[in-house]
């Protein structure tokens, strides 16, 4: 059995990946080894075939014994360790959740329901670096897969509403802590039967602006607020998250679909898990709405079309509705009054599953099954 080393397994993406692998019994087909950047020598998770202590994630010697390394540790780690392994002529496969290697010539961005043939060709051509796509990109492509298949799209504007967990475990916890602090700041007024809503508002706002409000990770309040900037400032008013949307989409589509233009603004909101996106889509020609709905809902096994009605939307097209499932919900599809062949759509998917862990889990399976 292949030796597979896991790095970053206790973070947000890594722990969701381990859960999915347990659900699918994937650990039965590999020898698994768990690495850490901070807890060397401590107990590894109790999973069959596992070495029972945590190994040093910076030890090139220990890592180079692996046939496959799957990292959910983050870009800084990848930048340090991937090159060190390559220098040692390590010949194994590297699977990664971080963005650092996505645009490298030697890598493929993996999202097999969309680009399975690209993955298979790359595998046959000796490629060994497999990177999961940006979460909103992967979720959007699965949602509009049906329109991509028939080459219907000229451009897409994606305005995102991204969950706190997209920034990692500590940020997700910080959102809840912030919520608690806001509640506590106004609790005395909330509990009055003749409460003043303006007093509640003022107390919460004062708390948000106070120096003791917890914001070590987000730097600013997210609870009761939003942050219309995600990732680095690339200059010219562009965030790195927005840049990824434009470039990664077409790297994934490159060999099998027509190129599309993608742009928009990315915003962090106070949802816990699952990213949402409001899409404006310019179609190349007129399509009936029934045809658009049919194309979308039959494209893959995970897309779920939500009828554009209030009741179905508020119950089924939200982060709370899809979190923890592999469903990619898409709804609010209607013709926009702004010009010809323009439609709207709203899509929500669990960014920790299809937006991160699931494409990596499936890539690992492709590698394991290939050599069976
Ligand atoms: P994360 O939750 O911050 O975890 C990363 C590492 O932080 C863990 O492996 C762990 O490493 C360490 N860590 C420190 N304190 C921790 C704590 N209290 N709980 C858990 N882990 C803790 O990061 P992530 O969100 O999983 O992201 C990992 C990579 O995936 C990043 O490159 C990110 O950009 C990418 N990604 C994330 C998402 C997402 O939705 N979060 C989606 C797509 C891609 P040690 O055990 O070695 O200390």
Image (spheres, helix red, strand yellow):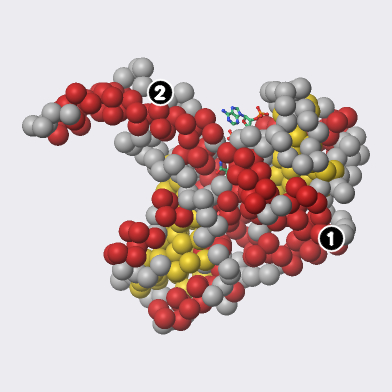
- Which of disc 2 and disc 1 is earlier in sequence? 2
Q: Residue furthest left?
A: 194
Q: Quadrant of ligand 1?
A: top right
Classify residue 333 by image quadrant: bottom left
Q: CA distance from mark 1 to mark 2?
A: 48 Å
Percent position of residue 210, x then y: 31, 19
Percent position of residue 153, x then y: 52, 71
Percent position of residue 274, x then y: 48, 49
Percent position of residue 21, x then y: 68, 49
Q: Nearer the viewer, residue 4 or 153?
A: 4
Instruction: Provide the secondary structure element on which disc 1 rests.
Output: helix
Please name the residue that numbered disc 2 is placed on.
Answer: 214
Q: Residue furthest right?
A: 89
Asked whether the viewer can see residue 151, the reply is: no
Please name the residue that numbered disc 1 is placed on.
Answer: 370
* Apparent side of residue 298 relative to residue 278 in the rendered image (left or right): right
Instruction: Provide the secondary structure element on which disc 2 rests.
Output: loop
Q: Residue furthest top?
A: 212
Classify residue 279 by image quadrant: bottom left
């Amino acid at each position: 059995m292949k030796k597979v080393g896991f790095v970053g397994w206790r973070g947000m993406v890594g722990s969701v990946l381990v859960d999915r692998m347990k659900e699918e019994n994937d650990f039965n087909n590999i020898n698994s080894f768990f690495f850490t950047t901070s807890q060397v020598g401590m107990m590894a998770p109790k999973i069959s075939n596992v070495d029972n202590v945590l190994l040093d994630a910076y030890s090139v010697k220990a890592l180079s014994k692996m046939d496959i390394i799957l990292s959910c540790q983050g870009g800084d780690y990848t930048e340090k360790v991937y090159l060190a392994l390559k220098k040692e002529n390590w010949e194994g496969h590297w699977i990664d959740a971080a963005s650092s290697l996505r645009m490298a010539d030697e890598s493929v961005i993996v999202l097999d329901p969309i680009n399975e043939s690209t993955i298979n060709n790359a595998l046959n051509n000796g490629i060994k670096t497999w990177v999961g796509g940006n979460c909103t990109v992967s979720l959007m492509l699965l949602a509009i897969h049906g329109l991509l298949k028939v080459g219907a799209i000229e451009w897409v504007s994606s305005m995102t509403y991204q969950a706190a967990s997209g920034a990692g475990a500590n940020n997700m916890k910080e959102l809840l802590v912030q919520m608690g602090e806001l509640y506590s700041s106004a609790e005395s007024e909330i509990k009055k039967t003749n409460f003043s809503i303006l007093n509640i508002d003022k107390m919460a706002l004062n708390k948000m602006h106070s120096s003791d409000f917890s914001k070590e990770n987000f730097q600013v309040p997210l609870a009761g607020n939003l942050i219309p900037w995600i990732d680095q400032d690339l200059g010219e008013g562009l965030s790195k998250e927005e840049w990824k949307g434009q470039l990664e989409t077409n790297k994934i589509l490159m060999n099998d679909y027509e190129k599309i233009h993608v742009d928009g603004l990315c915003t962090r909101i106070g949802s816990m898990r699952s990213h949402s996106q409001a899409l404006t889509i310019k179609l190349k020609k007129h399509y009936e709405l029934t045809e658009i709905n049919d194309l979308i809902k039959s494209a893959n096994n995970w897309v779920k079309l939500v009828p554009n009605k209030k009741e179905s939307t508020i119950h089924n097209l939200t982060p709370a509705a899809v979190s923890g499932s592999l469903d990619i919900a898409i709804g609010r599809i209607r013709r926009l009054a702004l010009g010809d062949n323009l439609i709207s759509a709203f899509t929500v998917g669990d960014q920790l599953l299809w937006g991160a862990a699931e494409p990596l889990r499936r890539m690992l399976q492709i590698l394991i099954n290939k050599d069976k």
